[in-house]
Image (cartoon, grey):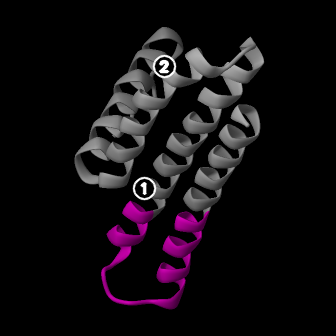
Amino acid sequence: MANQNAKGFKRLINACYFSAAGFKATWAHEEAFRQEVILFIVSTPLAIWLGETAVEKLLLIGSIVLVLLVELLNSAVEAVVDRVGFEHHELSGRAKDIGSAAVMTALAWAAITWALILL
């Protein structure tokens, strides 16, 4: 649990540890996140090589970073829903479906970005 009394630099250090724990947990428990990290590792050098301007390179890489960000948020939603209970509930299913739709939208945006810049 976060130290609610931490201030200043100590608070920032704590935040870094909690963020690292979040990355570690997502890597360990979410196959989709691992796949998207591999996509990022492969696509980043391609973006640097294929992008003609700094803006194009940033857009190509940024679109994949957006996918990672949305996947992290989706994984957080799924973890909270699962924490509440594993029994089927309409709202739990809806929350997970909406998170999945957000990831799919980010992936579609990345694909469109890559297609428009490269074609």
**Residue 93, magenta (yes or no):** yes
Q: Along the line of sight, which residue is nearer the eye, 23 or 82?
A: 23
Tell me which secondary structure the magenta stretch mostly adopts: helix
**Residue that appears at 47% across and 47% down:** 72
Name the quarter where the C terminus is drawn: top right
Tell me which amino acid carries mark 1.
Ser
Relative depth, front residue between 99 and 65? 65
Q: In this view, which residue lies farthest toward the left?
A: 28
Q: Start and end of the magenta stretch? A: 78-101
Asked if residue 5 is positioned above or below residue 29 in the image, the reply reads above
> What's the residue at 28%, 36% (across, down)?
24
Q: Which residue is mark 1?
A: 75
Task: Give, as a three-letter code, the residue at label 2.
Answer: Pro
Q: Residue furthest front?
A: 119
Position of residue 37 measured from the top left corner of the image (x, y, whole percent): 39, 37
The reply, left or right, for residue 112 in relation to residue 29 is right
Single out the residue that lies furthest toward the top: 9
Which residue is rendered at x = 58% and y = 60% of the image? Answer: 104
Disc 2: which residue: 45
Q: Position of residue 19 (x, y in %)?
A: 40, 31
The structure residue drawn at horizontal position 73% and vertical position 12%, both measured from the top left corner, is 54
- Report if residue 91 lies within the magenta region: yes
Q: Nearer the viewer, mark 1 or mark 2?
A: 2
Decide which of tag 1 and tag 2 comes sooner along the chain.
2
Q: Where's residue 68, x and y in %?
A: 50, 41
Q: Residues within 10 Å of mark 2 (few under 14, many from 20)?
A: few
Name the quadrant containing residue 25: top left
Q: Is residue 30 above or below residue 96?
A: above
In the picture, which quadrant includes the N terminus? top left
Circle 1 SS class: helix
